[in-house]
Image (cartoon, helix red, strand yellow):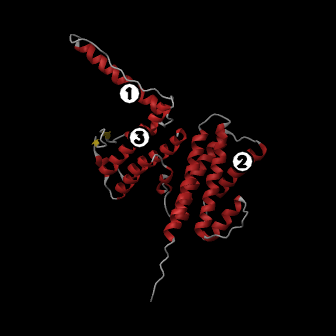
Amino acid sequence: MEQTIDTSAKDIDQAHTKRLAFAKHLYLLAESSYKLPPPNKFVSLLNLHDAVELFLCTACDYLAANTKSKIQFEEYFDSINKKLEPKQLELRLAMQRMNKARVALKHHMTFPSNDDLNEFIVNTKEFLTTNTKLVFERSLEEVSLMEFVSPEIVRLHLNNAIEHNTKGLTKEALAEIAKAWKELLFFHTTLMQTHGFMQKRSFRFRYGSNVDSEIEKFSNYTVESISDLSDSLKLIALGIDYRKYLRLVHGLPIANQSEGGQWYITFIGNLSNFSKEDIQWKINFLSETAIALSDFN
């Protein structure tokens, strides 16, 4: 008997994945906006609502749930829950409360309290994490923002890292992450220098051959310390979360590239200490950072 093969399934999955990735991106924007002073922090509530609504819309499409052309926020839950029976979407009441606060802000200029905003951030993350697993049978961590990553060379290295990590090739995955980080930092540092937002400076002490060895050691240490401080300020200027940066570079090999394009990777520490989850976190953080830095483009 001749079989008909459905070739559209893969494309549909890619479409849903991309929409989920954008919902995740909207949540991350909300997380960032929340850290800003008023009134900018209140934008986070609008981003949270958009993230949840996009998730619900994507879930309806994925489950082929019946929806009207114009549907109210709460009606999404009813349509999706009919498809999930006997299971139901989690945190429905929390999302309804968040939506009411969004309506109050958008239509009546009633600003939420800081405690309420914090609660909405926490609840929305839990909503997306729990229900992505429930509806799409995958973790939120697996939803990649890679299609939104630029420049292209960074995306290439991160995709290579994902492939290596999937195969359990820790050394190769870490090398690709190190290359991606080097390329990303170089691209945006150069960009900011070109536009005059950051100046390129280097210096060293000059002294005669008869200088005291202790003075020479102190001078070299001073130069290294200033260089480290300069690197830290560079990260802050680019808006990179320094604590997360420390987690990124922990155990990450040192990547250097020759003028001819040849990469030289120096590994440090014990590679067996890294789990697939550790490597995936580094990939996720780098992709999120690349997207955030695209504001400078």
Residue at position x 49%, y 56% in the image = 143
Q: CA distance from mark 1 to mark 2?
A: 45 Å
Q: Which residue corresponds to mark 3?
A: 247
Instruction: Classify 140 as above or below 210.
Output: below
Name the spot of residue 29 as percent of width and height, x first: 58, 45
Amino acid at circle 2: Ala
Amino acid at circle 3: Arg
- Sequence-wise, the earlier of marks 1 and 2 is 2
Marks 1/2 in contact by CB < 8 Å: the verdict is: no
Marks 3/1 in contact by CB < 8 Å: the verdict is: no
Residue at position x 47%, y 52% in the image = 146
Q: Which residue corresponds to mark 2?
A: 101
From this viewpoint, which residue is outermost toward the bottom? 1
Residue 265 - label: none
Q: Which residue corresponds to mark 1?
A: 228
In this rendering, position of residue 205 left or right of residue 104? left
- Sequence-wise, the earlier of marks 2 and 3 is 2
Name the spot of residue 91 as percent of width and height, x first: 62, 56
Q: CA distance from mark 2 to mark 3?
A: 35 Å
Q: CA distance from mark 3 to mark 1?
A: 17 Å
Residue at position x 56%, y 46% in the image = 28
